[in-house]
Amino acid sequence: MMKFPKIDLPHLKSKLQVKSPWDRIIISLLSLLITIPIFIILHQNLIDLEWAFNLDRIFIFIFVFATVFFLLMYLRTIIILCVAVYLLILFYGSVIGNYGFNEISEDYNSMIYTMSDNPYPQDIIVAKLLPFPNKSKIINAIEYQNPKVRNFAIMATSKHFKGIRGYSDYRTIIQCFAVFKEINGRWNYVNDPKDGDYIATASESLEYFSGDCDDHSILMAAAVRSIGGTPRLIHTKGHIYPEILIGSMIDLEKVNYLIKNVLFVKESYGKKLHYHIDERGQVWMNLDYTATYPGGPFMYEEILGALTLN
């Protein structure tokens, strides 16, 4: 009768559970990268206990890091495999000139920079993770190359602010503000049908300047883009609204002066501008249908998604 060698199961199990030192290094680095944005969110949202040397914040960071580290170590086999696959994808992207190591490093650094300078840093994460509602339909509806849309935008620039001189560097933004003035001065809010969302194209909305928030956002984005502006749409609680790219914080200072002292003096008197700063430090100004001047108040501060039209 054939005898099989005896297997020492406890010894084998202990061997299988031996952790490579590289496992700990990789998990530690990954834990640090995950901990930093989580810590920024907690730091911005938790009450500052004002302990000496910021010890409360140090303890929070250590606690978050330890929690993430032990969780990843528990799932280390899957995590290491996923990291290896992701590194291969980034290596391939770097070789062929697409999204690679440089790009992901820049995106991570810019995200951390933006989160640290944002009172709602969790919005930056949420905007990257959540899908934008009706994205494909909205993109198709933004007919910025439609002659009717461009002709309307040109008409608006001839009607408003045509005589403004001395701001050649901000001519495109001034013309986009003319589009904003024309659309918001004529817009009539009308609800969608009860049985679902109705996505009107930009050219369709030009007929009656009526519709709901997504119809307004589509028309505004199309008209702004048709004359060289860079718009994006923001999704928040049951609402979508357009924003326009202003540029840097230095540009914001110049645009702030233009709005309050040249273009929308009465509408913006005694009021502040509302804008967002994205993960690359770029300033985006509110153009919602509820606003009487660019940078008017937000209906909701929280960002659930962003759709940028380059």
Image: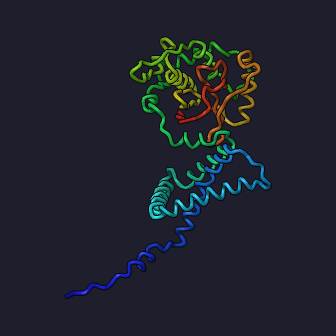
Residue sitting farthest toward the right:
52
Residue occupying the far left of the picture? 1
Decide which of 173, 46 is in the foreground and name it.
Answer: 46
Lateral position of residue 267 relative to residue 308, left or right:
right
Query: How many discs appear?
Result: 0
Is 290 drawn above or below residue 32 in the view shown?
above
Q: Residue 7: name its quadrant.
A: bottom left
253 or 5: nearer the viewer: 5
The residue at the point 42 percent across, 22 percent down is 198
Q: Position of residue 160 (x, y in %)?
A: 65, 14
- Residue 115 screen position, x and y as percent: 65, 44
Is any atom of residue 310 visible in this view?
Answer: no
Q: Quadrant of the C terminus?
A: top right
Residue 119 location (% of width, % of height): 68, 39
Residue 189 pos. (x, y %): 53, 15
Q: Residue at x 48, y 35 (%)?
A: 132
In the rendered structure, the answer to whether residue 22 lies left or right of residue 296 reads left
State the residue at coordinates (55%, 22%).
220
Quarter occupied by the N terminus: bottom left
The answer to whether one can see residue 216 in this image is yes
Q: How does the figure colour the protein chain or chains?
A: rainbow
Q: Nearer the viewer, residue 214 or 218?
A: 214
Q: Is residue 206 above or below residue 78?
A: above
Image check: 77 left or right of 116? Answer: left
